[in-house]
Image (tube, rainbow, N blue to C red):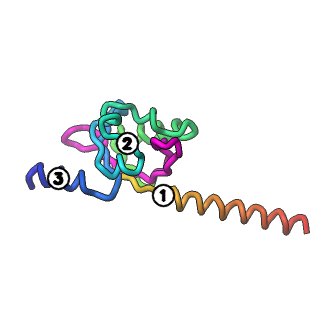
Amino acid sequence: MPYSSYKRFFDQSRELLCIVSLDGFFVDVNDAFTRVLGHPKSSLIGKSIRDLIAPQDIEKTLQEFKRIKHGESSTHFENRFNSSSGEYVTLSWSTSIDPESGQVVASARDVTEQSNQARKIQQIEAALNKTFILA
């Protein structure tokens, strides 16, 4: 399949797609990535992923990145990225190393809504448990 077909697939995918160097810098991002996070592509290319990750998620993300660098694939890893509006977007990642380039190829889905709903359910359950304990 010609490179142009792959590039078109990459650019037009609804999933957030990116390529990251082994030292953690964006090599390429697709249109969905820029649309969801609101950062222009030109400001992301060459930027460290650490610059976008929520401070509370940096350590677990670095641990996951180490696993990926050692050849392990990662599926359903979640962290939060800072959007251009200042809000955090919760992303669920699937990643692996491209054996040809040695770079990390990753796809992500915006799961912010599901994450917020799960947190609300946990809060309601905790409140209900507290109510039953006090009753």
- Horizontal side of 135 relative to 89 (left or right) equals right
Name the amino acid, label 1.
Val
- Horizontal side of 90 relative to 132 (left or right) equals left
Q: Nearer the viewer, residue 3 or 62?
A: 3
Is residue 52 magenta-colored?
no
Q: Main secondary structure of the magenta part?
A: strand
| Badge 2 element | helix
Q: Nearer the viewer, residue 17 or 78?
A: 17
In the orientation shown, which residue stands out farthest toward the left?
2
The residue to which callout 1 is attached is 111
- Horizontal side of 23 relative to 90 (left or right) equals left
| Badge 3 element | helix
The residue to which callout 2 is attached is 68
The residue to which callout 3 is attached is 6
Residue placed at 23% from the left, 52% from the top?
10
What segment is highlighted magenta in the picture? Answer: 77-106
Name the amino acid, label 2.
Ile
In the orientation shown, which residue stands out farthest toward the right?
135
Name the amino acid, label 3.
Tyr
**Would you call the spot at circle 1 few (<14 residues within 10 Å), some (14-19), or many (20 or more)?**
some
